[in-house]
Amino acid sequence: MIVEDHNVVTLSYELREGGPEGEILEVMNVHYPFKFFCGGDQLLPAFEEQLRGLREGEAFEFTLPPDLAYGDLDLDQVLDIPRDVFEEEDKGGLENLLIEGNFIQLTDEEGEQFNGKILSWDEELVKVDFNHAMAGKTLHFKGVVLNIRKATVDELIRKQVVEEDGVRGWDWGVN
């Protein structure tokens, strides 16, 4: 069996920034592997494309530049937001929220939620980066295909992994 559409694939891998010697961003090992439904439009298309055709036990190593991963940093996604918005959002006190590098979630007037990272703040404004956390990064993957199986009927309908206990696999939304 090979990595192709309508199969459930289990991987272990190491994700580094920039290249094989870069900073480790994520590790999915045999004790906590990454499992996905191939062809479900939930992963980066270039990530799936690099894995297609591989067999169980086969190793892989590839690099995705920002344009094939989460895109370049978009300065229009770095916004100055009035500080009083955060006082409405956080009932526990701003000292727990306004921390440089802290990831937050804000909700707009229509109820849509946005994830951002606090860059800085002063008495009036909070600078928040709403780019994807991996935007602007070159991603280097190195790993092995642990298992490949045909998707169940339920997985084919949902286009995502459904574990034996009925719990769906993690959904990687592509932004």
Image (cartoon, rainbow, N blue to C red):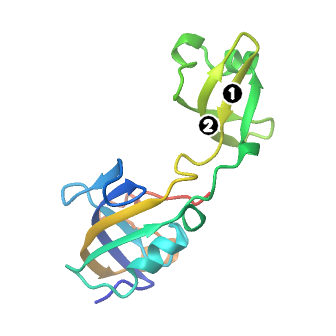
Secondary structure of residue under mark 1 = strand
The foreground one among 57 and 137 is: 137
- Tell me which amino acid carries mark 2: Gly
The foreground one among 171 and 61 is: 61
Quarter placement of the C terminus: bottom right
Quarter placement of the N terminus: bottom left
Residue 159 visible? The answer is no
Residue 144 in the image: x percent, y percent?
25, 71
In front: mark 1 or mark 2? 1
Write the residue at 79% across / 40% down: 110
Instruction: Kindly indicate the quadrant of the structure image that contains residue 35.
Output: bottom left
Secondary structure of residue under mark 2 = strand
Q: Which mark is residue 127?
A: 1
Residue 104 in the image: x percent, y percent?
58, 31
Q: What's the CA distance linking mark 1 and mark 2?
A: 10 Å
The foreground one among 143 and 155 is: 143
Instruction: Kindly indicate the quadrant of the structure image that contains residue 53.
Output: bottom left
156 over 68 or under it: above or below: below
Instruction: Kindly indicate the quadrant of the structure image that contains residue 129.
Output: top right
Residue 14 in the image: x percent, y percent?
30, 58
* Number of marks in the rendered image: 2
- Closer to the N terminus: mark 1 or mark 2? 2
Q: Which mark is residue 84?
A: none
Write the residue at 57% across / 53% down: 136
Q: Residues within 10 Å of mark 2 (few under 14, many from 20)?
A: many
Write the residue at 42% across / 68% down: 63
86 over 31 or under it: above or below: above
Q: Residues within 10 Å of mark 1 (few under 14, many from 20)?
A: some
22 over 143 or under it: above or below: above
Residue bearing mark 2: 116
- Tell me which amino acid carries mark 1: Lys
Residue 51 in the image: x percent, y percent?
38, 78
